[in-house]
Image (cartoon, rainbow, N blue to C red):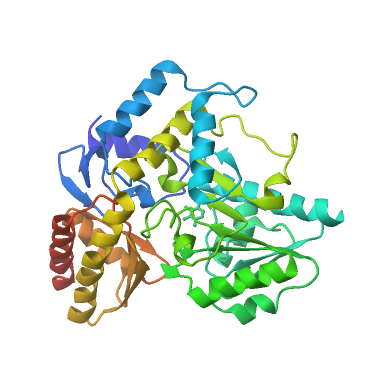
Amino acid sequence: MNSNEIMQAAEDHLIHTYNRYKIVLDHGDGAYLYDIDGKKYLDFGAGIAVFAFGYNNKEFNDALKAQVDKLIHTSNFFYNEPMAEAAKKLTEAAGMDKVFFTNSGTEAIEGALKLAKKYGFVRDGRTDHEIIAMGHSFHGRSMGALALTGNKHYQEAFGPMIPGIKFAEYNNLDSVKELVNDKTIAVILETVQGEGGIHPAKKEFIEGVRKLCDEKGMLLMLDEIQCGLCRTGSLYAFMQYGITPDVVTTAKALGQGVPVGAFMARGEAAEALVPGDHGSTYGGNPLGATAVCKTLEMFETHNLTDHVNKITPVLEAALNDLVAKYDFVTERRGMGLMQGIVVTISQADIIKKSLEEGLILFAAGADVIRFVPPLIITEEHIAEMKEKLIRVFDNI
Ligand SMILES: *Cc1c(COP(=O)(O)O)cnc(C)c1O
């Protein structure tokens, strides 16, 4: 099929939940993607903060290929080595006690939500517990995750939402305190809000929520599905805040494109779910678990957090230059290689024209252009991105 035939076949047969760009991607290499006609794109989206090591990484691919030839799937009724190794490596690295592997981020949230409800049920036998989530949050598209997502537009057609979810204002501790009552069992937030527009949590906010959770016996659940896994310069972003959550959700970069996510817990919360409470046919299968093991191993062998910390100021400086140069670019914010610039002109125009220039960018929130490149990017990639973006901005 040529590119038009491919796009037509996709539009004819896929449920239309995405307005796709008219580009048919074919293969990737490092920080670059190539379409079916050979056009090259510098990728500052990384498949939505997924490809930490870039595309077609031989070391990673070889590990997957070896596992494909050995065992892809068994069910969760048996043990296998990758499952055990991934669980050990991930929980130890994250400072958590236990993990449950899922196939996606939204399922990790779904599981964390059930864990919180069960934790409350074990404690007092009630089922009317409340959970506090944040405005402008994003936790996924399944019904539980959607109920926690502070975006009315996403929820509108799908009510009723599961009851007992209240929304506080992100980075406003008082707004959280106001919602706490004797039924509140957990607070969930993204350590750095992603889809909502790249908002890092303020240190006082996270510290305050941690303290509040300790005082009231509530679980602090951090969604690190986008900001976790070295993206902000530490394995998980919360590690830079000097606090430890009770529950962490993780996905996106966890399998480098192999669909795998997880929720982790520590202490009493890690013991809340028991046989019969939760399950998954695929979750943590040998292929997914191999991807997790290899990802965590390569973070270490490639000193990826060091690299992220070294390269972050270069990206920040490049984006700061754009803020200084164009009056329609009003602000830069972010943490590590999860950055955004606020624009007062159309996000869609910028993204479309960037694609024409061979640069892949995603939007976030209503007015933010998001930069979540592969973590292996170099100064040269950043210079190339800036050059392309200057051409876009000069012609807009
Ligand atoms: C992407 C994302 C999710 C949902 O993950 P999926 O794998 O798309 O289901 C949940 N929370 C955050 C913070 C995300 O960025």
Quadrant location of the N terminus in the rendered image = top left
Q: Residue at x 14, y 70 (%)?
A: 395
Residue 289 against residue 237 in the figure, above or below? above
Q: Position of residue 35 (x, y in %)?
A: 21, 41
**In which quadrant of the rendered image does the C terminus lie?**
bottom left
Q: Residue at x 56, y 21 (%)?
A: 74
The residue nearer to you, when weighing 194 against 67, is 67
The outermost residue toward the right is: 125
- Asked where in the image residue 199 lies, by quadrant, the reply is bottom left
- Relative side of 163 to 338, left or right: right
Q: In which quadrant of the rendered view does residue 154 lie?
A: bottom right
**Percent x, y for residue 192?**
46, 65
Q: Is residue 104 visible?
A: no
Name above or below for residue 195 compared with residue 6.
Answer: below
Determine which quarter of the picture holds residue 281. Answer: top right
Residue in the picture at 72% in, 71% down: 215
Please tell me which residue lies in front, 36 or 373. Answer: 373
Closer to us: 8 or 17: 17
Residue drawn 47% across and 32% down? 288
Image position of 125 with respect to 195: above or below: above
Query: From this viewpoint, which residue is outermost toward the top?
Result: 70
Relative to residue 84, is residue 200 drawn left or right? Answer: left
Relative depth, front residue between 66 and 110: 66
Residue 155 is at least partly visible in this image = yes
Tell me if residue 51 comes above or below residue 116 in the rendering.
above
How far from the left and from the top, in percent, is residue 301?
31, 41
Q: Image check: 316 left or right of 379? A: right
Residue 136 position in % (x across, y down): 52, 68
